Image: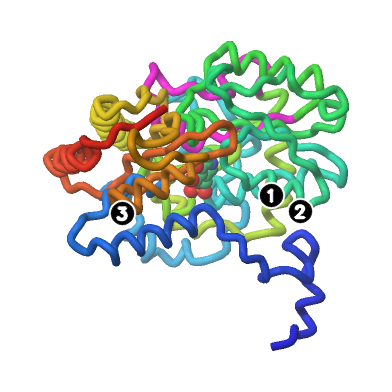
């Protein structure tokens, strides 16, 4: 069939006239297809799914009850615009209680419909054509995609084991630093599991000041911090003068589908963000905001989430260690990120993590997510569905049994 007229009209940012014609298959689609094939080829072999990156549990019952009650209130029916005071005040209480960070709920906090849209909108606040966003890789690419939509460029900062999974800010060429406007970081980091230190954040503040760059710290996994108490970027002296932190109720509160997050930090950046946001959406449903406020007021919820994923990560580290993988407990997140095997003794060799991932799913029905952006690594997620601790142990035993005879080469 010949092209319809609109094919020529697609914007260059999505591929222009070639939009929809690429035969390239994206990583996550490849994984989906491999999963389907494994299920079809081995219908009697359970798929061990360490590929899912979403919490496996519903939001707390107490939060669902608030939602159910708020749904019935006529006052909650309308546009929420930039958010209701109840949610912002709950965020201010949470930030003060958890991090001793004092924020003015009226000016230094704004809700977002999850942290993803906040990351998508912040480039609109700062990026003109030719400006640069500095971004760590591997990572969550949304701010970079939107930077490019606005005619900006992305400078990738690889997270390497030899740099302890921190970006090497000194390696950024002078011309890139001169054009850089945003530095997007993410700690606890997904997928490496690295948590930030005070020293690292202090270096980030110094870098931002010296180079006049705004910091966007993505704290989506912050309540899944296992090394001491969670650390907010805003706890660092001077941080508020150079940037904002983005938070999410998705991970720590099991509210992934509820779409609630917030941007907090410097009043002027928060205001500019809310102006852009006001032109993109009309706010999250007020009942959801009130339920999220109730979730923030209950310190037990993120503690339980943290305890559960910490327990599951420890079990998986034990098993994978015995199988020869070189993995250590992550500092945070629900991911284990480890060097990918280069092959199997007496079996295939792998030229990438993607090849190793394909082997695991095809030959053993074990699903992982490969990362080849900064070295070959495999990511195992512990958000698998398991009803209780016994079910977790059974899954671990099955994983070990399936891979026991395989001698991986690293
Ligand atoms: C590092 C990171 N940031 C942000 C997000 C977006 O989370 P949400 O939009 O659910 O708040 C995710 C989701 O997977 C993530 O992994």
Mark 3 surroundings: few (<14), some (14-19) or many (≥20) residues within 10 A: some
Magenta stretch: helix, strand or loop mostly: loop
Check contact, mark 1 vs mark 2: CB within 8 A: yes
Mark 1 surroundings: few (<14), some (14-19) or many (≥20) residues within 10 A: some
- To which quarter of the image does residue 44 belong? bottom left
Judged by depth in the image, the label closer to the viewer, 3 or 1, is 1
Q: Secondary structure at mark 1?
A: helix
Q: Is residue 208 left or right of residue 188?
A: right
Of all residues, the one furthest to the left in this rendering is 390
- First in residue order: circle 2 vs circle 3: 3
Q: Residue at x 81, y 76 (%)?
A: 8
Separation (CA) of disc 3 from disc 1:
34 Å
Q: Nearer the viewer, residue 158 or 132?
A: 158
- First in residue order: circle 3 vs circle 1: 3
- Which region shows up in magenta? 214-239
Residue on which the image places disc 2: 149
**Can residue 200 be seen here?**
yes
Residue 113 lies within the magenta run: no
Residue 284: give x, y in percent of width and height.
53, 57
Q: Nearer the viewer, residue 232 or 285?
A: 232
Tell me, for residue 190, which label it has, or none. Answer: none
Q: Nearer the viewer, residue 284 or 149?
A: 149
Residue on which the image places disc 3: 64
Residue on which the image places disc 1: 145
Q: How many numbered marks appear?
A: 3
Q: Is residue 92 left or right of residue 143?
A: left
Judged by depth in the image, the label closer to the viewer, 2 or 3, is 2
Separation (CA) of disc 2 from disc 3:
37 Å
Separation (CA) of disc 1 from disc 2:
6 Å
Check contact, mark 3 vs mark 1: CB within 8 A: no
């Amino acid at each position: 069939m010949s092209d319809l007229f609109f094919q020529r009209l697609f914007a260059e940012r999505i591929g222009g006239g070639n939009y929809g014609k690429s035969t390239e298959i994206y990583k996550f689609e490849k994984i989906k297809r491999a999963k389907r094939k494994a299920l079809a080829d081995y219908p009697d072999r359970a798929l061990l799914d360490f590929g899912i990156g979403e919490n496996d549990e519903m939001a707390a019952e107490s939060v669902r009850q608030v939602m159910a009650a708020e749904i019935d209130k006529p006052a909650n029916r309308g546009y929420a615009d930039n958010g209701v005071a109840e949610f912002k005040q709950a965020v201010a209480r949470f930030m003060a209680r958890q991090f001793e960070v004092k924020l003015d709920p009226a000016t230094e906090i704004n809700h977002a419909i999850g942290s993803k849209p906040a990351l998508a909108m912040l480039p609109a606040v700062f990026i003109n054509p030719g400006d640069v966003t500095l971004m760590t890789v591997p990572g969550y690419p949304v701010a970079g995609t939107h930077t490019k939509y606005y005619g900006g460029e992305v400078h990738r900062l690889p997270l390497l084991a030899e740099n302890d999974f921190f970006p090497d800010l000194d390696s950024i060429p002078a011309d890139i630093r001169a054009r850089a406007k945003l530095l997007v970081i993410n700690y606890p980091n997904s997928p490496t599991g690295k948590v930030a230190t005070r020293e690292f954040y202090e270096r980030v503040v110094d870098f931002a000041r010296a180079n006049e760059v705004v910091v966007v710290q993505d704290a989506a996994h912050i309540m899944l911090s296992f090394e001491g108490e969670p650390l907010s970027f805003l706890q660092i002296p001077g941080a508020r003068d150079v940037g904002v932190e983005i938070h999410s109720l998705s991970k720590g509160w099991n509210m992934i589908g509820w779409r609630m997050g917030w941007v907090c930090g410097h009043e002027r950046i928060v205001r500019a963000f809310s102006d852009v946001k006001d032109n993109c959406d009309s706010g999250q449903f007020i009942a959801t905001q009130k339920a999220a406020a109730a979730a923030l007021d209950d310190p037990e919820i993120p503690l339980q989430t943290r305890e559960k994923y910490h327990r599951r990560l420890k079990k998986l580290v034990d098993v994978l260690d015995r199988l020869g993988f070189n993995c250590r407990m992550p500092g945070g997140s629900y991911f284990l990120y480890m060097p990918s095997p280069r092959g199997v003794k007496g079996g295939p060799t792998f030229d990438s993590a993607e090849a190793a991932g394909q082997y695991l799913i095809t030959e053993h029905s074990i699903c992982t997510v490969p990362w080849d952006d900064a070295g070959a690594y495999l990511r195992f997620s512990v958000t698998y569905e398991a009803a209780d601790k016994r079910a977790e142990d059974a899954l671990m035993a099955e994983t070990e049994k399936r891979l026991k005879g395989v001698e991986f080469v690293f």
